[in-house]
Amino acid sequence: MTTDSLPLLDWQRPRQVIPFPGRHRTGHAARVANSLSNSASQKDADWRLSRAVDAMRNQMAKAGVHSDQIEREVRSFLILVNHECTRIGSSWSPVIECQQNQPDGAA
C-alpha cells in the first residue's frame, strides 16, 4: 500500500455554512439598537429585543442550524447590538452574560 492511496491523508474537515452569521448582521443590529434607543420603557426595550432575537432563532432553526450554533450566533448578534447602542449613545443596551464553563445541572 502506498501513501498515495491512504484515504486518511485526503480527509478534510466537514464544512458548515452558517446562513445568518450574527457578527455580520450590522444593518439589522443598527436597526435594533435604534429601536431600543427609542423605547419608552425598559419593558418596551426588552420586548423589542426579544422579538428580534426570537425571529433570528426561528430563521436559523428553519434553515437546520444546530441549537448550539444558534446560541453562539445570537450571542455574537447581541454583542453587535450592544456595540451599536454604545455607538449611538443609547440609554439602553442588552446585557450579555458570560456563559463560559457553566454546568447545565444542579448541584
Image (cartoon, rainbow, N blue to C red):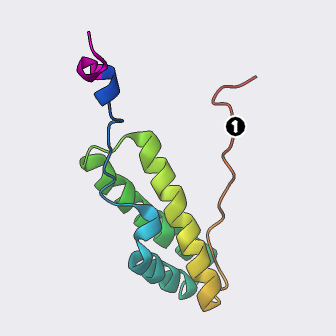
Whole-percent x and y of residue 53?
Answer: 44, 62
Whole-percent x and y of residue 54?
Answer: 40, 58
Residue extent of the magenta highlight? 1-7
Q: Is residue 11 above or below residue 25?
A: above
User: Per the image, is 6 magenta?
Assistant: yes
Secondary-structure class at tag 1: loop
Residue 95 horizontal side relative to residue 69, left or right: right
Quadrant assignment, res 11: top left
Which residue is depicted at the point 52% across and 80% down? 33
Quadrant assignment, res 41: bottom right
Of the residues shown, which amino acid type is indicated by label 1? Asn
Residue 77 horizontal side relative to residue 96, left or right: left
Residue 99 horizontal side relative to residue 54, left or right: right
Q: Is residue 54 above or below residue 26?
A: above
Quarter of the figure with the C terminus: top right
Q: Is residue 14 above or below residue 75?
A: above
> Mark 1 — residue?
101
Quadrant assignment, res 69: top left
Which residue is depicted at the point 33% across and 34% down? 12
Whole-percent x and y of residue 29?
Answer: 46, 76
Quarter of the figure with the N terminus: top left
